[in-house]
Amino acid sequence: MLLPAERALNNPNKTPDAAVIWLHGLGASGNDFVPIVPHLGLPKDLSVRFVFPHAPARPVTINGGSVMPAWYDIYEMSLDRKIDLGQIEESSEQVKAWVEKLVSDGIAHERIILAGFSQGGAVAYHAALTSDKPLAGLMTLSTYFATSATVQPLQARSMPIQITHGTRDPVVPYQLAGLAEEKLKSLGYEQIETHSYPSEHTVAPKQIGDLGAFIARCFGVLT
């Protein structure tokens, strides 16, 4: 199972009926995105539970074998990104287990969004598309579709997907966002929205508003 996660509610006075599982990037922790929740601009009558899992510590080849929080090992930082596919699939299964935990807590599959930044976004792509249960949406930030060549999608093609990326990103090149969008369309996914920002490998201020608007729409609130 995933390590303990940080949780936050945009409306702590109401029992949540929706959730977002948000995965952090390489070397970070689940705490990184907790402070963003109050700035998403979600309506107060929309009670969303945010879950921020911590990746396990493992050696990372591109960082000289140093042990750090990582969803999977990265062998090479080429545009094609040579990675440990077994570990990304393992992390994906852990995310699905967390989805089931939320369901057991009373939140329906159709009210759960998967989200991820950078390496966490690669896991979110795979977990969402290979889920055999309907999800509310997929939200990817500054990331890439690591398993695009091998994925066998089970998720309905009607699932909303948001891709956000900085045009000056030196870590995950902006063109990888376009390649991900092209692959998703070739797989039959049509509800894709993309946003770009003149930023590097980070979350831009305007991006936070776009993320919040997408979350609200996925949960049936017009923005």
Image (spheres, rainbow, N blue to C red):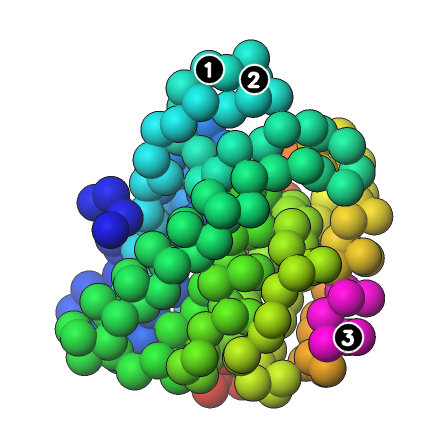
Give the crowd class for mark 3: few <14, some 14-19, many >=20 residues within 10 Å: some
Q: Amino acid at mark 3?
A: Lys
Membership of 94 in magenta stretch = no
- Sequence-wise, which precedes: disc 2 or disc 3? 2
The x, y position of residue 107, in whole percent, is 25, 78
Q: In front here: 83 or 21?
A: 83
The x, y position of residue 118, in whole percent, is 58, 43
The x, y position of residue 184, in whole percent, is 72, 70
Q: Amino acid at mark 1?
A: Ser
> In this picture, is 53 found above or below 187?
above
Query: CB atoms at circles 1 and 2 under 8 Å apart?
Result: yes
Q: Residue under circle 1?
A: 66
Q: CA distance from mark 3 to mark 1?
A: 37 Å
Q: Residue under circle 3?
A: 185
For residue 19, the mark is none
Image quadrant where residue 16 sits: bottom left
